[in-house]
Image (cartoon, grey):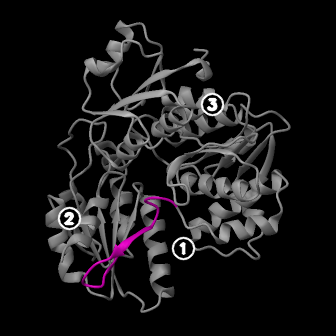
């Protein structure tokens, strides 16, 4: 569908609280246009959109779709029989997915698309900061809230459009990029993809959108990426060859060094001064829910939160936490992890990998699986994970609620402790409850 967002005056969003789709809602609001939208639950994102002027509905009902809406934009996570989507069809209101809308934003702009199974949010934010600090005034869409802007959308007037590009359901194929970053490729979104080869095929299709003078920035010798690189007709830049000399980061973890190398490689392509890029990265403080410091509990325990929901991400985050603990003043000695699995399908298909993700934790508390877009699957649950984690010699137990998790944290929440909540659902609320305790 050809779509001219400039002519649109009234838009309704289905799933407006999503971290990606909400960026488009922010963009429409900044243009002075009318925005309404619905989501299943209220959140920080819906509250912020409401403050900006959006009309927010909690729950989804056909009556909430304005008859005079010019466009409906919906998250790909909703089912085809969603009542609001059905009403849009009934009213003959054009309806597009969030990836389609994002693709329209990227049209006729110099698009830098940041993709990969892990690290794409942080890398997008790093690149966005470098370009903003260099005065390039880019438009940025990222799958988290940027610390400085406190938004997942930055409106710019420059030629660059820097966007996080998600591979789920091949969403990134809607973009029209000139530079593609692939941070890594892993077995992810297996509720949609058949296997790793299928995922690699999607990335190859994405890279095929690049012309001979365009760029692919990636870890070119990574075994999961090599098949994609072999088929690439564009210029290939191996970010692992980017020098780390002079690189100083405020965010911990080897994975963030790799993210920074990718960002530096993109900056070099755009001919931005390296010294300025390094200075920008040194002042990069991370994004919302990426090893984010939440506060210090009354007991003295440090509380951090992270969005990691894949075994690879969990391992990297726990390793980064350990690195941080070693370098911190008054070094915390005990690491307690509160994990909320995300999706029944992901938990089942990567069960063994999840079990092996917590080896560097002193204690693990596992919450019930966050179902998100999926129906309940009784063949997998958190207690099964706990049972297998304990076999690895790690103290682990399950908790049926946030309050119960907090009670199980308390005996280990002294001033020498770091509490890490991790997961793509609402596990961060555990830390918030802990911090409110008197």
Quadrant into which the N terminus falls: top right
Q: Is 410 in the magenta? A: no
Earlier in the chain: of badge 3 and badge 2, it is: 3
The residue lying at 14 percent from left, 65 percent from top is 404
Quadrant into which the C terminus falls: bottom left
The residue lying at 25 percent from left, 64 percent from top is 430
- Residue located beneath label 2 in the image: 387
Q: Which residues are magenta?
A: 287-302
**Percent coordinates x, y for residue 148 in the rendering:** 55, 60
Earlier in the chain: of badge 3 and badge 1, it is: 3
**Percent coordinates x, y for residue 208 in the rendering:** 71, 32
Q: Nearer the viewer, mark 3 or mark 1?
A: 3
**Percent coordinates x, y for residue 323 in the rendering:** 50, 80
Q: Can residue 119 be seen from the camera position used here? A: yes
Q: Does residue 73 lie above or below 255 as drawn?
A: above
Label 2 sits on a secondary structure element that is helix
Q: Does residue 223 lie above or below 314 as drawn?
A: above
- Residue located beneath label 3 in the image: 105
Outermost residue to the bottom: 330
Relative depth, front residue between 385 and 295: 295
Earlier in the chain: of badge 1 and badge 2, it is: 1
- Residue located beneath label 1 in the image: 252
Q: Is residue 336 left or right of residue 198?
A: left
Label 3 sits on a secondary structure element that is helix
Q: Can residue 142 be seen from the camera position used here? A: no
Relative depth, front residue between 159 and 247: 159
Pointer 2: residues within 10 angstroms few (<14), some, or many (20+)? some
């Amino acid at each position: 569908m050809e779509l001219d967002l400039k002519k649109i005056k009234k838009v309704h969003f289905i799933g407006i609280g999503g971290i990606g789709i909400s960026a488009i809602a922010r963009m429409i609001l900044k243009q002075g246009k009318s925005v309404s939208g619905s989501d299943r639950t209220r959140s920080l994102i819906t509250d912020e959109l409401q403050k900006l002027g959006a009309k927010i509905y909690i729950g989804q009902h056909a009556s909430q779709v304005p008859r005079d809406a010019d466009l409906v934009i919906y998250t790909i996570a909703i089912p085809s029989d969603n009542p609001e989507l059905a009403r849009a069809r009934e009213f003959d209101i054009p309806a597009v997915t969030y990836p389609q809308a994002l693709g329209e934003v990227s049209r006729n702009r110099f698009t830098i698309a940041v993709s990969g199974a892990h690290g794409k949010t942080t890398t997008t934010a790093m690149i966005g900061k470098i370009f903003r600090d260099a005065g390039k005034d880019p438009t940025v869409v990222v799958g988290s809230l940027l610390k400085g802007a406190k938004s997942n959308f930055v409106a710019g007037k420059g030629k660059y459009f820097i966007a996080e590009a998600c591979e789920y359901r091949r969403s990134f194929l809607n973009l029209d990029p000139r530079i593609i970053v692939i941070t890594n490729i892993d077995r992810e979104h297996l509720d949609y993809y058949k296997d790793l080869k299928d995922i690699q095929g999607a990335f190859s299709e994405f890279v095929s959108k690049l012309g001979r003078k365009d760029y692919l920035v990636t870890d070119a010798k990574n075994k999961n990426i090599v098949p994609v690189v072999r088929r690439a007709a564009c210029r290939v830049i191996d970010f692992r060859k980017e020098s780390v000399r002079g690189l100083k980061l405020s965010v911990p973890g080897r994975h963030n060094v790799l993210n920074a190398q990718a960002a530096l490689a993109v900056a070099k392509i755009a001919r931005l001064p390296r010294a300025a890029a390094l200075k920008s990265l040194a002042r990069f403080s991370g994004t919302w829910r990426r090893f984010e410091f939440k506060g210090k509990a009354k007991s003295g325990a440090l509380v951090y939160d992270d969005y990691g929901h894949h075994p690879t991400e969990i391992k990297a985050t726990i390793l980064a936490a350990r690195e941080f603990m070693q370098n911190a003043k008054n070094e915390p000695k005990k690491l307690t992890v509160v994990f909320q699995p995300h999706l029944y399908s992901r938990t089942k298909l990567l069960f063994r990998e999840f079990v092996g993700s917590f080896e560097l934790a002193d204690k693990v508390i596992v919450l019930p699986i966050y179902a998100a877009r999926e129906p309940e699957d009784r063949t997998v649950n958190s207690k099964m994970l706990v049972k297998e984690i304990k076999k690895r010699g790690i103290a682990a137990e399950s908790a049926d609620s946030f309050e119960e998790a907090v009670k199980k944290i308390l005996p280990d929440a002294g001033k020498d402790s770091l509490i890490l909540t991790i997961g793509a659902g609402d596990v961060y609320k555990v830390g918030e409850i802990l911090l409110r305790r008197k």
